[in-house]
Image (cartoon, rainbow, N blue to C red):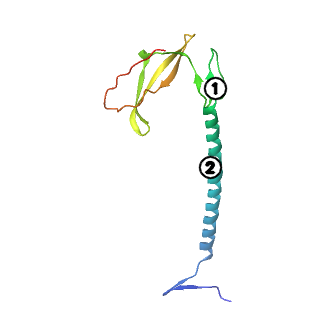
């Protein structure tokens, strides 16, 4: 019995053994990569669920003293204090919802302690080319 041969006009198609092997390896690699992507998607969904659960949790009220950093991951922290406008830094060329602008970074003096902490305070995003006056509210 002769192997099946395909004919396309004047051309005959006879696949070589190495061509079939290469196609089989390519198919196996595609299936393996698809399974990897499927597992990675499950990991990402679990990670997003943890982040969402932490965001929905109540804020951690900070009292004076150290807090373990692992307990603060993706959590909101409630601080009372005063922003120090004299030490304001503008971070230029930042995007916010697709619009160019800047972020405002101000240190925060925590109430009841002499220590200051760096907190990011975003006062909206303005066009980089025009001057935007900053208004400070105390309280």
Q: Which of labels 2 and 1 is toward the front?
A: 2
Looking at the image, how many numbered discs can be counted on the residues?
Answer: 2
Q: First in sequence: mark 2 or mark 1?
A: 2
* Residue 30 placement (x, y as % from top left): 61, 61
Residue at x 42%, y 18% (from the top left corner): 136
Q: Which mark is residue 69?
A: 1
Residue at x 59%, y 24% (from the top left corner): 77
Side of 12 where 92 appears, left or right: left
* Residue 84 placement (x, y as % from top left): 46, 15
Dots 2, 1 in contact, CB < 8 A = no
User: Counting other residues with Cα less than 10 Å from the Cα at mark 2, is it few (<14), some (14-19), or many (20 or more)?
Assistant: few
* Residue 44 placement (x, y as % from top left): 62, 45
SS at badge 1: helix
Q: Which mark is residue 41?
A: 2
Residue at x 39%, y 38% (from the top left corner): 99
SS at badge 2: helix
Query: Does 131 appear above or below 8?
Result: above
Residue at x 55%, y 12% (from the top left corner): 111
Query: Does 113 appear above or below 122?
Result: above
Distance (Cα) linking label 2 and label 1: 27 Å
């Amino acid at each position: 019995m002769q192997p099946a041969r395909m004919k396309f006009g004047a051309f005959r198609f006879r696949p070589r053994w190495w061509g079939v092997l290469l196609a089989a390896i390519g198919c196996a690699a595609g299936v393996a990569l698809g399974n990897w992507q499927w597992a990675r998607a499950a990991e990402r969904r679990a990670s997003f669920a943890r982040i969402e659960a932490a965001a929905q949790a109540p804020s951690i009220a900070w009292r004076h003293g150290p807090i373990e950093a692992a307990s603060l991951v993706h959590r909101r922290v409630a601080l009372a204090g005063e922003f120090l406008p004299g030490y304001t830094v503008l971070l230029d060329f930042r995007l916010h919802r697709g619009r160019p602008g800047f972020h405002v970074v101000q240190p925060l003096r925590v109430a009841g302690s002499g220590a200051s902490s760096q907190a990011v305070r975003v006062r909206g995003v303005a066009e980089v080319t025009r001057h935007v006056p900053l208004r400070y509210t105390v309280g």
